Amino acid sequence: MYPQYEETVNTVLSVLDITGIFVFALSGAWLAARRAFDLVGTVALGTVTGLAGGIVRDVLVGDLPPLAIQREIYLFVPVVAALAVVVAPGIVQRFGFPVLVLDAIGLGLFAAVGAAKAVDFGVGVWAATMIGVISAVGGGILRDLLAGVTPQVFGRGSQLYATPAALGAFAVALLWERMPASPFLVVGAMVGVMTIRLLAVRYDWHLPGPPRRLVEDDTERTG
């Protein structure tokens, strides 16, 4: 890869990574506001949501210390997103981006960027896919747990969540070195993940689980 092209690709990935942090942080802060968190709680939840997935990704690929520690902008972005919700909730609400849509955008961004970065660090296709999924769902899981909500990825009958992230991460991991390393692949995968996730919510697509009778019987025994 030519040095100038490689620099351009890295710049695009950094921009997408920061965008994912901002969007996920907004979703965390917006959920905190709906749960009546105070200023500290809102900023904390937004920051954790925005940074958790990327930090885990960097640890898994061996990029240490994580970018959130190396570059101050990574710490600054989620705080700005959270403060935007606190200071001007009306403006944020007018954009029409509820937690669901913000979460879908962040899911796609982190799945694609996470898989691309893993491949760049010499990780195989399947491991890169796993890292992309963990990067994508990690922030959302922590956000929901800290807000007292069942994480979407765990809820019985919940619409497809980790599956779109896995498909997008796999596509990037498989093709990243063959295209070669095209930012358009990352953007395309992000759009694909976001679209599948939102369609799954719209049309109630979900993976099969255990028979409801078994779940109810287990509830009765533990109740």
Image (cartoon, rainbow, N blue to C red):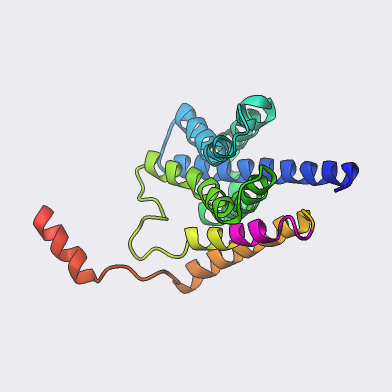
Left or right, 209 with respect to 23, comes to left
Instruction: Determine the image quadrant of residue 185.
Output: bottom right
> Up-down: is 210 above or below 166?
below
Residue 178 located within the stretch drawn in magenta: yes
Q: Nearer the viewer, residue 83 or 70?
A: 70
> Up-down: is 221 above or below 38?
below
Q: Nearer the viewer, residue 111 or 151?
A: 111
**Residue 58 picture location, percent across and down:** 59, 37
Q: Please give the range of residues in magenta.
A: 168-179
Left or right, 49 with respect to 178, comes to left
Residue 134 located within the stretch drawn in magenta: no
**Residue 91 picture location, percent across and down:** 63, 45
Q: Residue lying furthest bottom in this view?
A: 203
**Residue at 47% over, 44% down:** 31
Left or right, 141 with respect to 210, comes to right
Q: Nearer the viewer, residue 51 or 88?
A: 51
**Residue at 52% over, 52% down:** 130
